[in-house]
Amino acid sequence: MRLSAALALGLLALTSVCAQANSYDLPPPGSRLVGQNQIHVVQNDGGSLEAIAKKYDVGFLALLQANRGIDPYVPQPGAVLTIPTQVLLPDAPREGIVINLAELRLYYYPANQNKVVIFPIGIGQLGGDTLTPTMQTRVSEKRANPTWTPTANIRARYLAQGIELPAVVPAGPDNPMGHHAIRLAAYGGVYLLHGTNADFGIGMRVSSGCIRLRDNDIKWLFEQLPVGTPVAIINTPIKASIEPDGHHMVEVHQPLSEHIDDDPQRLPIVLDAAMTAFRDNPATDARQLEQVINLRQGMPVNITRPFPPAPAQI
């Protein structure tokens, strides 16, 4: 029996999404919870935390925050790590790309596939002209083997460190944009999603304002993503959901620092009206919510208040 061309193409597209390590079916209506955390036992091979993060395609800081006290350079052999691959989807329309700066993640919702694919990202460094802004925009262009034209501010910043950048960096292994670039329409097209020629920095604030992905991730996204795809960039360190089974779930990340001496573990997290209503819901354990906000481990936590059993009927 022969498949129609349209059906065959649909299955091929679906397979390409499912091939991603962190690809999930969308949850049922009313739910925002996807994925399951994984466990990794550190081997006696001298591997770094970054190597483990890359293996599971999660961000470096996400892995570090989920495993407080672990040595980021040479984790102890035999240590049991939690891999944070369970998440609450952002409170944003499930279409195109949604980037949450605070959690250093990109969510891609392929059209007509009931899927979400999640990637760790690097974003802009702390500083006036290197911050990655929030925005509502769209993909305006895709380019393989891009050249890099550093801005005057970027060249001046590098020069202050004793590095003189050329006016244009050609495509190739020395290009910090990697092999693929996806341009966003907002702000005159100065912000891009792109790859990297470095083995470190995904899941951190490392770029000059663009959104950086691992090379395999940007290559896959480049091949799948249509020009014109909507892109929403938000900054939400706390997410919550009342799941269909009644569980009250919350996920808290460190807020982005605004000043060099900020401690993101201690920066205040302001609850908006929706989060205040979630906290004040009788089924939410407000004390546990406060503890989760203080810990900021970046993983969903069930904070449903345990109700006392109903009195026995006589």
Image: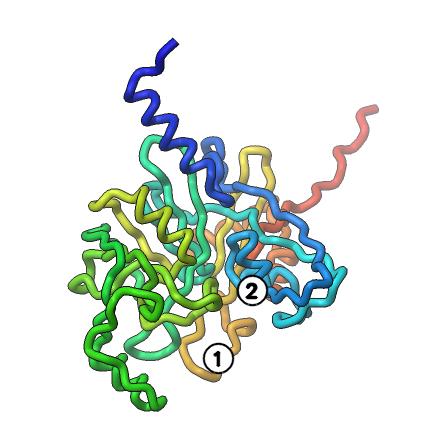
Residue that label 2 marks: 50
Outermost residue to the top: 1
| Residue 160: image location, x then y, percent | 32, 90
Closest to the observer, 149 or 89: 149
- Left or right of 156 in this view: 211: right
Please identify the quadrant where the C terminus is shown: top right
Q: Specify whether residue 132 is in view.
A: no
Q: Judging from the image, what secondary structure is the residue with disc 1 in? A: loop
Residue that label 1 marks: 262
Does residue 11 lie above or below 135 as drawn? Answer: above
Q: Residue at x 42, y 81 (%)?
A: 259
Tell me the colour scheme of the image: rainbow
| Quarter-of-image position of residue 185 | bottom left
| Residue 98: image location, x then y, percent | 36, 50
- Left or right of 11 in this view: 251: right
- Left or right of 267 in this view: 169: left
Q: Judging from the image, what secondary structure is the residue with disc 2 in? A: helix
Does residue 264 lie above or below 260 as drawn? Answer: above
Outermost residue to the right: 314
Closest to the observer, 43 or 233: 43
| Quarter-of-image position of residue 95 | top left
Look at discs 1 and 2 and give the one toward the viewer. 2
Does residue 244 lie above or below 80 as drawn? Answer: above
Please identify the quadrant where the N terminus is shown: top left
